[in-house]
Amino acid sequence: MKFVDEFRDTGKAKSLTKAIHKIAQSLAPKLTKPLQIMEFCGGHTHTIFRYGIEQMLPDNIEMVHGPGCPVCVLPMGRVDDCIALAEHPDVIFTTFGDAMRVPGSKKSLLQAKADGADIRMTYSPMDALNLARKNPDKEVIFFGLGFETTMPSSAFTVLQAEREGISNFSLFCNHITTVPTIKAVLDSPDMQLDGFLAPGHVAMVIGERPFDFIALDYHKPIVITGFEPLDILQSLWMVLQQIEQGRNAVENQYTRIVHANGNTPALEAISQVFEIREFFEWRGLGSIDHSGVRMKESYAAFDAEKKFAVPNIKIADPKSCQCGEVVKGVIKPWDCKIFGSKCNPENPMGALMVSSEGACAAYFNNGYHERKTA
Amino acid sequence: MSLPLAKTKFSGKTITLSHGAGGKAMHDLIKEIFIAGFDSPELSLLEDQARFDLNELTKLGNRLAMTTDSYVVDPLFFPGGDIGKLAVTGTINDLAVGGAIPLYLTCGMIIEEGFPIDDLQRIVASMKATADAAGVRIVTGDTKIVPRGAADKLFINTAGIGVIAKSSNILASRAMAGDVVIINGYIGDHGAAIVDARGELALEIDVETDCQPLNDLIQQMLAVCPDIHCMRDATRGGLATVLNEFAMSSNIAIQLEQTKIPVREEVRGVCEVLGLDPLYLANEGKLVAVVKQEDADKLIKLMRQHPAGKNSCVIGNVEASPQGKVILATGFGGNRIIDMLVGEQLPRIC
């Protein structure tokens, strides 16, 4: 397949792997522990597991799978809010597919659907707007979820609804922001990371500059990375080169998509519709300042939180969960006390077991725990 | 499939509850749509059961095989097939992959009030054409009409009977280290065609279901290689699920080569866009077989000459360990474990 297979070329993978091994070997005498490189984004985690990239890396390089899976980090209380909205008799509740299975305190959206709520899977908020046009006697709510990657499509849909005067469409805004979250990880006292792969599709929207603080203030190399397996390998090689040369910079591997200044119309739409929340609750990481957005007062007519009474009850993460330590690279998934026993993909207790992009679910499904503990 | 419909007194009408009430309306519907449509001697006798001559059956083998399956596909008509073709094919294939020669099918229909009788007639004609082409007969049936909302348009159940020859012993537990895994063509066509036909995703692809009876192909395979170790049709849950069943039942490992697994460009494209994995997409005309290494070449050669097996190939081999696991060499240099799906395959957010 054109424009896909080129980025999965085995020959190029071999030469990049060789180059990575070479740098790792030359760094080895200086290292007291393996280098920990975090891929922030769940999409990267998915690619790493799908192509078996970890097995191609030298022993002194460890991938730490970060908190950038929006489905995983959704707190139980927010899922309960979704279900409360979806169970309104006149509501059609629309959502991205993989949010359907996330457990709330009592049930998931999938279970709520089975119990009779009108919940539909859509690929785009524009599909939800279309449903609103076709069902004028129903309120169609779109579950806005994700980082800056999906934020513009939510914003554009609200703007379109406003332009057309569609009054039966609203957004349940749970969009989250990347930079405060990376900062929270970096500020954590037990953090031991040596470098980052930055989320390519977030950077496509926000550009390169918002990542500068990682290099300037925290002195860590960071490379904006695409989502094909060769992208990952090349970016890892770029991070290692920076480490070898003693540099800390924001570099862009994903130049075919990411412009240094991001996407101006997308950023304008975001700032027109959304404003920063004081804090947002994350599953596994707790409350992080300024890590979410809400809709501006001027768009209250399209804000499901304003149109409906949302219970907004906080549900604490199960005490036994060690997701926070896993996403910071302090422990490996299989070191968690409940990994694979009380917490498994059929019955996820913690954030990282929820979606296939979560580190724990990925390790569990790939049977790594059996190999590591064998 | 658009066959010309015979004109009946029901043309242009819809099903009502009276068609299931046991009176004249029901009698007429059965006679004009089902008896005329399926046109089999057993059915035309209008007895409460079909009857078979045991002597005829024992000429074909020493064991009876029996299976049942229900079909609830939405939409009822999709590129390359419809629920009727699926209902006949699916049950034929469930018999055939056990080594059975499929002979007789039943047909139970649950129809929602308001269903267009022309569509029913079209589906019956499609079942008849599929059964004829596969050499099986629909010999008995049942019809129930339920009020609007109590069922979604039309559900079909078919059960089937076949005969297994003495020489074959196909079991999911017979895979052995050293065996190879073969498939009869492209995976994921049916799943992709259904996703497309639902029309919710505004995809513009040109993929048809692979829905096809496999009994003739399988009988030819058994003729040259009676000792096929394992064989199943990879329907719901796809290739990945069938291979996991083999790996667990046989306590062996299956090592797959991603680059050898045939997937159409269009299906790969759908999966790339939607975040799905073709290994888990449904098929309705794909068999997965585990055979001895030395039998593989002659089988593949034979299968490729059959219309249902033109793209047959070896996709992997059986190893002793890790027991119960299916491992895929990704074609990029790494391996990953192919597990059973926890629930249904859900598209990823980004």
Image (spheres, helix red, strand yellow):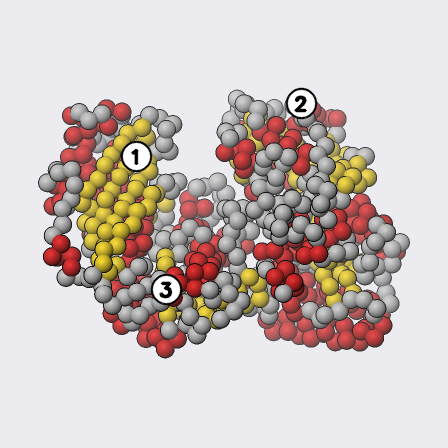
Res B35 quadrant in image: top left
Chain-order first, disc 1 or disc 3: 1
Q: Where is residue A345 in the image (x, y as percent from the top left)?
A: 59, 48
Q: Mark 3 lies on which chain?
A: B
Callout 1 secondary element: strand
Say if mark 3 contacts mark 2, CB within 8 Å: no
Residue of label 2 = A309
Q: Which chain carries label 2?
A: A
Q: Mark 1 lies on which chain?
A: B
Callout 3 secondary element: strand
Point out which mark residue B230 bears. Answer: 3
Disc 1 from disc 3: Cα separation? 34 Å
Disc 1 from disc 2: Cα separation? 42 Å
Front residue of B112/A190: it is: A190
Depth check, mark 1 against mark 3: the one in front is 3
Name the residue: 58% across, 35% down: A107
Residue of label 1 = B110
Name the residue: 35% across, 26% down: B148
- Amino acid at circle 3: Cys
